Amino acid sequence: MSIAGGYYKAVEAAAEHGCDCVQLFTKNNNQWRAKPMTEEDGRRFQQALRRLGIRAPLAHASYLINLATPEQTLWRKSIEAMIVELQRAEVLGIPYVVVHPGSYTTADESFGRKRIAQALDQVIQATSGLKACVALETTAGQGSNLGWRLEHLAWIRRHVQQPQRVVFCLDTCHLLAAGYPMAPQDAYEQTMRQVDRLLGRRQVKAIHLNDSKGSLGSRIDRHENIGLGHIGLEGFRLLLNDPRWQKVPMYLETPKGTDPVTGLSWDRRNLAVLRALVGKRRVPAGVRRKFFPQQ
Ligand SMILES: [Zn+2]
């Protein structure tokens, strides 16, 4: 949600759209600089959470950050920016900052993952004493992006000096695009067994719920509204009813705007579709009739 007008505005927007939790950029996601944050900003943000009953606030780091880059200037800048991201999250009382591990560009995979672990060591050391932690997100694997294989993420956490400050965020669109199926049940089970074995279910602190415009293994990062992409309703039904993730907050990162079928905002519509799948042993026919009349 957008922070235009104040950080607490993201909380208000989440409540308006019927969400239980909220994810935000604590600064413009395409700029290095940010206006300083005050204690008052943090108080107003926390007040809004309490007043509106929104839980599990989550920060997403700037897209400019690349902790894997071989380019020294950009690498240093990325480390500095990630430190600032954690400091800002701390002021707002946000426990995790989601970041994409990074792209090795002209270097190679092994250089990239070492570079990320080294960068994280510096970030963690410079923010020792803060509660805010780094949440590495699974990626679709576009270009030289690392983190599309679960092994990359597991390796990085194993090689930082303070792994207790590093957790994980799953993204359903990215998992599918990276080649991890989300349905049918046996394929879903296999995916989640790998997540559990390589990342550890207790280290997964957030899940991004996005359908995928790209097909299984396409390595294309394009988010789609729920049920309209290559994951489909059954994949989300399996995830939402998986006891492993009962206590893990989940966040939409789907396109904004209005759904022409229901006339609802896409956020409201996506939430309604997802909530209709909770506790169901199969996708209810009514969900298809109501939200997918053309299919
Ligand atoms: Zn995501």
Image (spheres, rainbow, N blue to C red):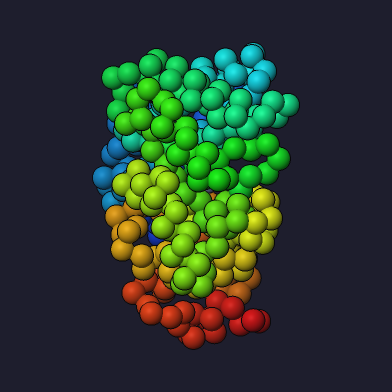
Q: Quadrant of the C terminus?
A: bottom right
The answer to whether residue 271 is seen in the rendering is no
Q: Residue at x 42, y 33 (%)?
A: 157
Q: Residue at x 37, y 22 (%)?
A: 161
Q: Residue at x 38, y 52 (%)?
A: 196
Q: Position of residue 106 (x, y in %)?
A: 73, 26
Looking at the image, which is closer to me, 123 or 277? 123
Asked if residue 156 lies left or right of residue 149, the reply is left
Compared with residue 274, is residue 27 higher up or lower down, i.e. above or below? above
Asked if residue 222 lies left or right of residue 242, the reply is right
Q: Position of residue 113 (x, y in %)?
A: 55, 29
Compared with residue 122, is residue 267 higher up or lower down, i.e. above or below? below
Compared with residue 50, is residue 212 higher up or lower down, i.e. above or below? below
Residue sticking out furthest to the right: 106
Q: Residue at x 47, y 65 (%)?
A: 188
Q: Position of residue 101 (x, y in %)?
A: 54, 34
Asked if residue 140 lies left or right of residue 48, the reply is right
Q: Position of residue 290 (x, y in %)?
A: 53, 81
Looking at the image, which is closer to me, 109 or 143? 109
Asked if residue 80 lies left or right of residue 111, the reply is left
Q: How many dots with numbers?
A: 0
The answer to whether residue 110 is seen in the rendering is yes
Looking at the image, which is closer to me, 99 or 152? 152
Compared with residue 284, is residue 92 higher up or lower down, i.e. above or below? above
Looking at the image, which is closer to me, 165 or 277? 165
